[in-house]
Image (cartoon, rainbow, N blue to C red):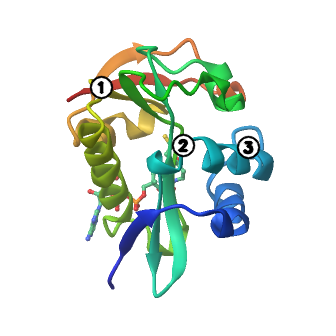
Amino acid sequence: MEVMIRAVCLEDLDRITEIEAICFPAAEAATRESFQERIAAFPESFLVAEIDGIIIGFINGCSTNSSVIYDELFHSTEGHIVDGKNLAVFGLDVIPEYRKQGVASKLMKQFIQVARNNGKENVILTCKERLVHYYESFGFENNGISNSTHGGSKWFDMTLVL
Ligand SMILES: CC(C)(COP(=O)(O)OP(=O)(O)OC[C@H]1O[C@@H](n2cnc3c(N)ncnc32)[C@H](O)[C@@H]1OP(=O)(O)O)[C@@H](O)C(=O)NCCC(=O)NCCS
């Protein structure tokens, strides 16, 4: 299985929206409109994973000077500061059929490389408790419970110092 990681393009919009709806409950899933705005605003930090030309996962996020993710950041690309010191992860998705084979890991490592290449100081994200150990495996530190109530869930703030 050869997984290719590449930058997103507008033609990916329908497939990305479809995958997001598979991976997240409706209250947490980003909409097609939101993805369209994100692709236009920060294509450099929006990566897709594909096998034989079919997208099976993706990662996306914006630049910010905030040290933590706050809910408004998810809802509008106005929070994207091109020269922001941190790169935030909004979402990491892999379709169920291809999980536990390192696809998300490949996406995350490439995303971290994008952050390094752009001189960012930190990669930040929020995650559910069950994934804290997974992000720690990339070197993220757990900063405790987040103020985010995105989708009505409890989230943890995680930071990777570059
Ligand atoms: C979370 C998610 C992105 C992980 O995707 P994935 O491609 O399965 O991730 P990986 O393969 O890199 O790692 C997943 C697990 O498989 C293990 N793994 C990786 N390659 C493996 C392999 N070849 N054989 C066996 N296990 C493997 C990893 O060690 C990891 O183990 P852990 O759960 O004990 O930490 C995916 O489950 C998903 O989309 N979930 C729904 C959306 C979501 O919750 N996203 C995160 C939001 S914060």
| Kind of residue at badge 3 | Ser
Q: How far apart, in angstroms, are the residues tagged by discs 1 and 2?
A: 17 Å
Place residue 106 in its image quadrant: bottom left
State the residue position of label 2: 42
Q: Nearer the viewer, residue 116 or 155?
A: 116
**Mark with earlier residue (2, 3):** 3
Q: What is the distance, in whole Å, between disc 1 and disc 3 at their CAs?
A: 24 Å
Sort mark 3 into few (<14), some (14-19) or many (20+) by Cα contacts within 10 Å.
some
Mark 2 or mark 3, which is nearer to you? 2
**Position of 152 relative to 21 (above/below):** above
Label 1: element kind: strand
Q: How far is the residue under mark 2 from the one under mark 3?
A: 12 Å
Front residue of 110/146: it is 110
Q: Secondary structure at mark 2?
A: loop
The image shows residue 138 at horizontal and vertical percentages of 23, 42
Instruction: Indicate the quadrant containing the C terminus: top left, top right, bottom left or bottom right.
Output: top left
Which comes before the other along the chain, label 1 or label 2?
2
| First-in-chain label (1 vs 3) | 3
Q: Position of residue 151 (x, y in %)?
A: 71, 31
Residue 122 is marked as 1
Q: Which mark is residue 34?
A: 3
> Is the distance from the Cβ of mark 3 to the nearest ligand 1 atom less than 8 Å?
no
Q: Residue at x 70, y 29 (%)?
A: 76
Q: Quadrant where the N terminus lies?
A: bottom left
Rendered location of residue 10, percent (x, y): 66, 63
Q: Amino acid at mark 1?
A: Asn
User: Which residue is painted at 37% across and 74% down in the image?
Assistant: 4
Which is more foreground, mark 1 or mark 2? 2
Which secondary structure lies at badge 3?
helix
- Residue 95, relative to residue 119: is it above or below? below
Q: Quadrant of ligand 1?
A: bottom left
Inspect the image, locate mark 2, and give the three-letter code of the amino acid beneath it: Phe
